Image (tube, rainbow, N blue to C red):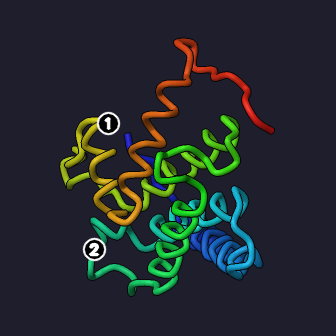
Amino acid sequence: GRITVPPRIENMLLGQLKRAIDRCYADPEHSGRLSNNHHLTTVACLLVLLASVQGSSAGRDPRAQPHDPRFDTATRWLVRAAKEQFDRDGVHFEYSTGYHMCAAECLALAGLAFLEPPTATGTSPIRTAQDRWERLLSGFPDVAGSLAAAVRFADAVTRPDGSYPLVGD
């Protein structure tokens, strides 16, 4: 069954989420001078936190809380970071499988912020991994090609047990 969260606890959790958003947004790595996996991780978390508070950009209920302009700013940061992290051929700029996987996972995490929430009946309009992937790429047309190539690269180097060779630093 459903878990009922007392309003006092719900307000406390919402307050914690909002403080986490403020901390992520104020992170000095967004200054434009730094572009690295730390920045990408923070931006991905920021987008997911914002979506959890206000609803995803795709399925946001317009009657819900007002749209937070930081979502749009964080989306721009994400696109910039994706362009800087991956070459056009989809390989991470440090030529490291570890950084490649980390950056690809951060982009996949950020993609959660752009997915439609389940319908009132509890079913998701996005049913397959391919649907989720296409929806994510449609949200980032400027980097869709390099992200698709990054996924192909990740798939090519991933072993059947889920591990990958450690190449680079």
Amino acid type of the residue that numbered disc 2 sits on in the rendered structure? Asp
Q: Residue 119: image x %, image y %? A: 21, 54
Left or right: 160 as drawn, with respect to 124: right
Q: Residue 31: image x %, image y %? A: 71, 82
Residue placed most toward the observer, 146 or 103? 146
Whole-number angstrom distance, CA of label 1 to CA of label 2: 24 Å
Give the residue at x 20% y 55%: 120
Q: Residue 80: image x %, image y %? A: 53, 70
Seen in the picture, residue 168 relative to 80 is either above or below; the reply is above
Amino acid type of the residue that numbered disc 1 sits on in the rendered structure? Ala
Quadrant in which the C terminus is drawn: top right
Quarter-wise, where is residue 65 in the image?
bottom left
Q: How many marks?
A: 2
Seen in the picture, residue 41 relative to 157 is either above or below; the reply is below
Quarter-wise, where is residue 64 in the image?
bottom left
Q: Which residue carries the number 1 mark?
A: 129
Tell me the number on the disc at residue 61.
Answer: 2
